[in-house]
Every structure is written in structure tokens, then in C-alpha cells.
């Protein structure tokens, strides 16, 4: 087994990976989990969410894939899903960690001035006005989450989008760690799948588009995402179907066609096989749960 396949997948650090709810957001500080890691967070990855980590005090060593930095606050990183990362800090250090599901990041992508497919790591000076804005915005994100949790989603997404754009302004596109050939190919595949999954391309079309071989493409998908190329395609179609079921009133048949299934019965079988219930039942259960969650006391 390759070293990549031995890297643990987590939900949030220390908790087993699990399927995320559509629109998932989570905010906490690094030291909220101090009793799990004591400042030494081993290399790990998150299969279905990206993370913004803003170090507002202290410092240490941070790793993303094969790159390592010594850093001190203020420092910020954005790490997409399935990118390996970890760090060591002392107990005087702390950071705000904003975890955002892949489906939410895909919805934000057209509105932000930062590539959300590649990792970013930036350090700065506390007196820099742009860093002061980052600090203020992430304090607002943290406070909003503490007060309202998922019920403040619209405000949270607006704030997170601005933070991501500020990361780009601060130099996100110039501060990327060098990607290994396998990682670069996997990220190119994910980007290509996002563009073409509705067209139900066979794997061979992606091999041709990315100028590689079936073996190398499948190897990259397995090492970085833990999925074959075909499974990655199916998971992307499933993700979009869940988003449309949750956030639109379009019919099941229309949603099936949108994600590449001309036969509504085939779409329903596909969805039931992967989720365990029919699309209509899944939509009804999640909408009822959200309505119940929204009935909170002021």
C-alpha cells in the first residue's frame, strides 16, 4: 500500500470521516481540540471539505503535501479537500478553522478571486490593513457560528467568500506549494470533472483531455481522492443531484436530466443505490429536518 493511502481521512480532526450534509459549515479553533492533539496534528486529509485556517496568535511548523513552512501569526491557509496537511505548534498558539463542504465551495467559486482547487499558504504583518480585515472578518465568522450555527448560513457564506477573495488579493495565486505530478494530475481531473460531468463522458475522454494514460489517471484518482475515475464521476453527479434536491423546487425528472440521466427510473435507481433511499424521500426528509432545525427559540 502506498504512503498516500495510509494518510488518515477525518471529518474534523480526530473524528472518523463521514458523509457531509449538503451545505455543511463548521467553525472552531485549533485549541478547541487541544486534548486530542496537544499542538501536534499529524498529516491527514478531509475527503469532502476544504478548510481555511487563520493563525491569529503564536506560530510553529505547517505542512501541505510535500512543503513545510516555519510560520508566525498572522498566517492563513486554504486547503481543498483531499490535500494532505498537518502542523506542530505550542500551547500559546491558536487559529480559527473554517470547514466548508465541497458543494458549498463550488457554489462560491464563481464569486471569489481565488482558485479553490489548489492549496494556499500565506504569512503577513499584523499592521497590514488587509490582514486586519482578514482578522475582523474571521472573528465575525466565528461569532456568527457561535451565535447561530447553521442558521446563519447566508451571512456566513458572504463573509467566507470575502475572506477567500482577500486571500487571493494577499497573494494566493503566487504562494502555492509545488504540486507533485500525481497531485497536479488529480487536481486537473477534478477540475475537468466539474466542467464535464453532465455530459456523461467515458473515462477515455478524460484521459485524452488531460494527455495522460488510463493507468496514471486512475492511480492519481485513487491516491489523492481514494476513488477510481469512474467513482469520482459518479460522486460528482450525486453531489449535484443532492444540491438541486435541497435548494431548488425542480422535479426529480428534471434534476436527473441536469446531472446526466435521461431515464428518470435509472436516476432513481442510481440515487437509491448510493444513498439508500429514493430522491423524493431524501428530499422530503432533509427539508423536514431543516424546517425543524429552524424552529429555534430567540
Image (cartoon, grey):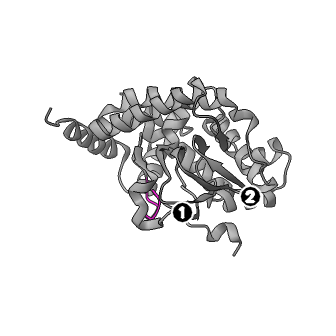
Residue 71 place in picture, x, y as percent: 65, 49
In the rendered image, residue 153 lying in the magenta stretch gets the answer no
Please identify the quadrant where the N terminus is shown.
bottom right
Residue at 84% across / 51% down in the picture? 212
> In this rendering, is residue 180 above or below 165?
below
Q: Mark 2–mark 1 contact, CB under 8 Å?
A: no
> In this rendering, is residue 271 above or below 1?
above
Residue 230 in sight in this render: yes
Query: What residue span does the magenta drawing correspond to?
Result: 11-19
Q: Residues within 10 Å of mark 1 (few under 14, many from 20)?
A: many
- Front residue of 82 and 125: 125
The image quadrant that residue 148 belongs to is top left
Residue at 67% across / 57% down in the picture? 224
- Front residue of 254 and 296: 296
Please identify the quadrant where the C terminus is shown.
top left
Magenta part, dominant SS? loop
In the rendered image, residue 15 lying in the magenta stretch gets the answer yes
Query: In what element is the residue under mark 1?
Result: loop
The image quadrant that residue 24 belongs to is top left
Number of residue marks: 2
> In this rendering, is residue 114 above or below 1?
above
Q: Which mark is residue 271?
A: none
Q: Which mark is residue 66?
A: 2
Residue 284 place in picture, x, y as percent: 28, 41
Query: In what element is the residue under mark 2?
Result: loop
Residue 165 in sight in this render: no
Q: Residue under label 1, please give it.
A: 9
Q: Indicate left or right for 2 with 207 as reference.
A: left
Amino acid at each position: 500500500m502506498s504512503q498516500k493511502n495510509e494518510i488518515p481521512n477525518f471529518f474534523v480532526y480526530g473524528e472518523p470521516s463521514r458523509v457531509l450534509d449538503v451545505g455543511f459549515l463548521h467553525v472552531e479553533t485549533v485549541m478547541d481540540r487541544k486534548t486530542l492533539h496537544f499542538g501536534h496534528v499529524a498529516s491527514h486529509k478531509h475527503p469532502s471539505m476544504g478548510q481555511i485556517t487563520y493563525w491569529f496568535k503564536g506560530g510553529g511548523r505547517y505542512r501541505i503535501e510535500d512543503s513545510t513552512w516555519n510560520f508566525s501569526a498572522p498566517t492563513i491557509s486554504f486547503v481543498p479537500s483531499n490535500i494532505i496537511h498537518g502542523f506542530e505548534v505550542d500551547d500559546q498558539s491558536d487559529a480559527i478553522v473554517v470547514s466548508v463542504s465541497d458543494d458549498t465551495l463550488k457554489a462560491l467559486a464563481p464569486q471569489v478571486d481565488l482558485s479553490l482547487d489548489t492549496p494556499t499558504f500565506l504569512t503577513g504583518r499584523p499592521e497590514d490593513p488587509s490582514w486586519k480585515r482578514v482578522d475582523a472578518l474571521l472573528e465575525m465568522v466565528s461569532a456568527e457560528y457561535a451565535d447561530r450555527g447553521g442558521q446563519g448560513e447566508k451571512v456566513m457564506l458572504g463573509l467566507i467568500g470575502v475572506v477567500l477573495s482577500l486571500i487571493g488579493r494577499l497573494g494566493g495565486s503566487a504562494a502555492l506549494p509545488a504540486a507533485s505530478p500525481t497531485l497536479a494530475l488529480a487536481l486537473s481531473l477534478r477540475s475537468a470533472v466539474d466542467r464535464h460531468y453532465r455530459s456523461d463522458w467515458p473515462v477515455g475522454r478524460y484521459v485524452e483531455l488531460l494527455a495522460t494514460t488510463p493507468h496514471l489517471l486512475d492511480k492519481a484518482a485513487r491516491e489523492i481522492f481514494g476513488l477510481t475515475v469512474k467513482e469520482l464521476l459518479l460522486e460528482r453527479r450525486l453531489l449535484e443531484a443532492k444540491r438541486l434536491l435541497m435548494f431548488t423546487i425542480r422535479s426529480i425528472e428534471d434534476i436527473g436530466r441536469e446531472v446526466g440521466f435521461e431515464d428518470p427510473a435509472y436516476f432513481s435507481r442510481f440515487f437509491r443505490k448510493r444513498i439508500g433511499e429514493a430522491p423524493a424521500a431524501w428530499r422530503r426528509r432533509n427539508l423536514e429536518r431543516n424546517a425543524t432545525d429552524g424552529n429555534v427559540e430567540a
